[in-house]
Image (spheres, grey):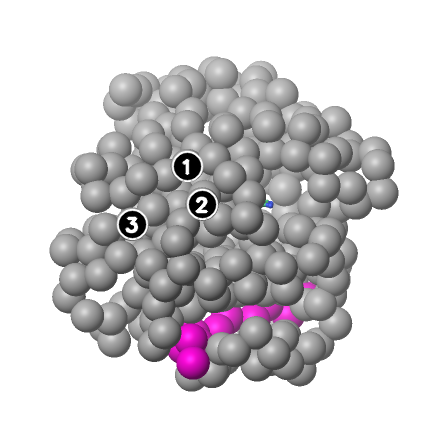
Amino acid sequence: MMQYHEFETTFEKLLQTQKDLYPYAVDYHQTNFQHSIQYLLSSILSQTEALLQQPQANWENTEEVVGDILYCADVNMQQLFSLEIPNELTADRDFEDVKTKLYETKYYPISEHLNYIFLPPALERKMFIHKHLDRLADTGHFCDLGFGPGVLSAFILQQKERWIGCGIDISSYCLQHAERLLKKKKVLERCKLSLGDVRALPYPDDTFDLVVAVEVLEHIPDPEVGLAEALRVLKPGGYAITALPINLPILMHLYDFESPDEILALYKKVGLKVVDFETKEFQRQTETFVDTFALSIKL
Ligand SMILES: C[S@@+](CC[C@H](N)C(=O)[O-])C[C@H]1O[C@@H](n2cnc3c(N)ncnc32)[C@H](O)[C@@H]1O
């Protein structure tokens, strides 16, 4: 794997040749390398540029996360910088369109993983899980629905050393990426990740002590179906950690929640008792949106 100093040299060269494209990255680079790499990567991946111009982001884990991404995606910096960004989705918020044009690309798990460098809602998801890990028993079995780059699965397995896990995601690129992350974090032997759809889980009823469904149910047109499946595989008395955005109508979100009350009503309807519910406001480009984080118990 590329060492950090090689990474920095490569980065510096590339930056000089791409000055026009990433002027603010160049500015940052002159004062603080760690800042500029985040600006550059995020610019290249055309994500949330405005957000990144806020200097209060948490920069601490940059090197580790970038190292993880290079390893998981099996690319070097040159390849990462020349990564092809998927074309705009064309169909009107259609699941198959999103799946083939976005989830089934090498770009997708990388872009989701990059969020864990800087994106406040992603960092908040991890913090919400962290906040509740202590109430879990020392041993247990969890399932991560829509595990994406695998950051949250890896985090839980690292924090709960006697837990085992499994997970489902619709994207074969996420599966490959996440398995490599778990391997790098030395927790893969305690976790079985698979390809699958949250709307039809391949697990028996009452299997898990904890089900995690973080920023995934809004990616299907019928979140209630996915949530009911999550509940089916959760043991009575087991915990669910869920995160759902409100009013964030981006193309891969196939269902728009309109209010925290709508989300709370859905949890109640499927048989979840909410123990902790947080709503937080975040900026996305020029708009604000609210993200919700919930810990619930299956009645
Ligand atoms: C925004 S990402 C969240 C990833 C991860 N939970 C996290 O918070 O880091 C949404 C994930 O849901 C997955 N996904 C979308 N529709 C799905 C479905 N029907 N079944 C399983 N996974 C799905 C996507 O492939 C993607 O990895």
Compare residues 184 and 104 and report the one nearer the observer. Answer: 104
Residue 254 lies, in percent from the top left, at 73, 52
Which residue is labeled 3 in the image? 165
| Amino acid at circle 1 | Ser
Marks 3/2: CA distance?
14 Å
**In this orientation, does residue 129 appear?**
no
Residue 263 lies, in percent from the top left, at 63, 75
Q: Is residue 50 left or right of residue 114?
A: right
Marks 3/1: CA distance?
11 Å
Where on the picture, by quarter, is residue 67?
top left
Q: Which residue is at 48% across, 73% downward?
A: 294
Frontmost of labels 3 and 2 is 2
Screen quadrant of the N terminus: top left
| Amino acid at circle 3 | Gly
Which residue is labeled 1 in the image? 194
Disc 1: CA contacts within 10 A as few (<14), some (14-19) or many (>=20): some
Where on the picture, by quarter, is residue 291?
bottom right
Magenta part of the protein: which range? 288-299
Q: Is residue 237 left or right of residue 102?
A: left
Residue 136 lies, in percent from the top left, at 24, 71
Task: Give the structural element (helix, strand or loop) at label 1.
Answer: strand
Task: Give the structural element (helix, strand or loop) at label 3.
Answer: strand
Where on the picture, by quarter, is residue 6?
top left
- Residue 130 within the segment the image draws in magenta: no
Which residue is labeled 2 in the image? 202
Q: Earlier in the sequence, mark 2 or mark 1?
A: 1
Q: Earlier in the sequence, mark 3 or mark 2?
A: 3
Compare residues 270 and 77 and report the one nearer the observer. Answer: 270
Q: Earlier in the sequence, mark 3 or mark 1?
A: 3
Q: Which residue is at 43% across, 81% downward?
A: 299
Q: Is residue 148 left or right of residue 53?
A: left
| Amino acid at circle 2 | Pro
